[in-house]
Image (cartoon, rainbow, N blue to C red):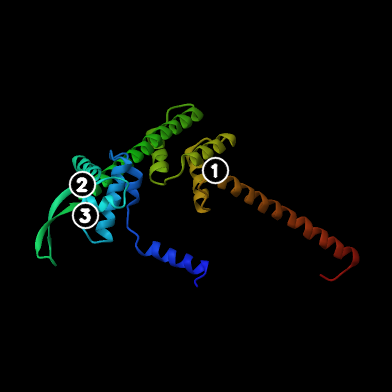
Amino acid sequence: MANNDTYHILATSLLEARGIFIPALLLQLYGRLGLSEAELMVLVHLLYWRQVEDERFPTPEKISQFMHMDREEIKNLIASIIEKKLLAVEPYYHPSLGRWQNVFSFKPLWTKLIQTALEDYHTEIEAQQSTTIARQGELYQAFEKEFGRPLSPLESEQLKAWCQEDKIPIELLQEALRRAVLRGILNFRYIDSILKDWQRHNVRTVAEAMAYDEKLKTKKTRSTRSPASSTRKDKYRDLYRLNP
């Protein structure tokens, strides 16, 4: 008699062996396509018949076997999906049967899914670009405010190059400007030297810049302590006339 572990392994194998492929985009965007949950489930069952049973035009009766709906409801749902131009009926020549027959085509659905996903992607990119442009405008204003004058064309080009060509984060440019103001060295050459030093040490965020400062401070502290320690050792040797 099989134990519980054997049943578990068998059940898992059965579930994994006859899976179907459903694009994640379909589950994410079906509402955006105007599909109801019932229509989505009909599409899932059509995919099952296509992928598992190798049947391209299952009847409403076959689909209703696995849904709590009668054949007329299934038929109406399929008709609704076709009216929404997300499913099509096309002729297909079946090589083993040697004749033409109707099949459900998912091409309209996949095309619409890709179009919707691309629209979302472009909308997101445009929003990011708008935000970036707005923040760059604020950065220009911050530089002009600290310099107390409009930026020259050369300075404007340099600021643009830092943002667009060197891809330096705006927060890091603001931090470099802040340090230049605090040290009273308000010119683009000095700011550029700060940025290049950060670039050499792979500093890409303000937090990393702070950590880099601490590292330099610790290194400087150690280097200043070393001579004093060496001097104490020398005095000790002299005091007791020890050989070095």
Q: Earlier in the sequence, mark 2 or mark 3?
A: 3
In the image, residue 17 above or below residue 60: below
Q: Is residue 92 above or below residue 114?
A: below
**What residue is shown with label 2?**
87
User: Residue reaching furthest right?
Assistant: 240
Give the mark nearest the N terminus, 1 or 3: 3
The CA span between labels 2 and 1 is 52 Å
Please tell me which residue lies in front, 15 or 238.
15
Q: CA distance from mark 2 to mark 3?
A: 14 Å
Amino acid type, residue under disc 2 in the picture: Leu
- Image coordinates of residue 199 in percent, x first then y, are 49, 50
The answer to whether residue 103 is left or right of residue 149 is: left
Q: Which residue is mark 1?
A: 206
Q: Position of residue 144 (x, y in %)?
A: 46, 29
Mark 2 vs 1, N-terminal side: 2
Instruction: Report how far apart the C-alphas of labels 1 and 3 lie in the structure.
Output: 61 Å
Position of residue 18 relative to residue 221, above or below, is below
Quadrant housing residue 15: bottom left
Closer-to-camera residue (71/86): 71
In this picture, residue 168 sits left or right of residue 86: right
- Residue 7 marker: none
* Residue corresponding to mark 3: 58
In front of the other: label 2 or label 3? 3
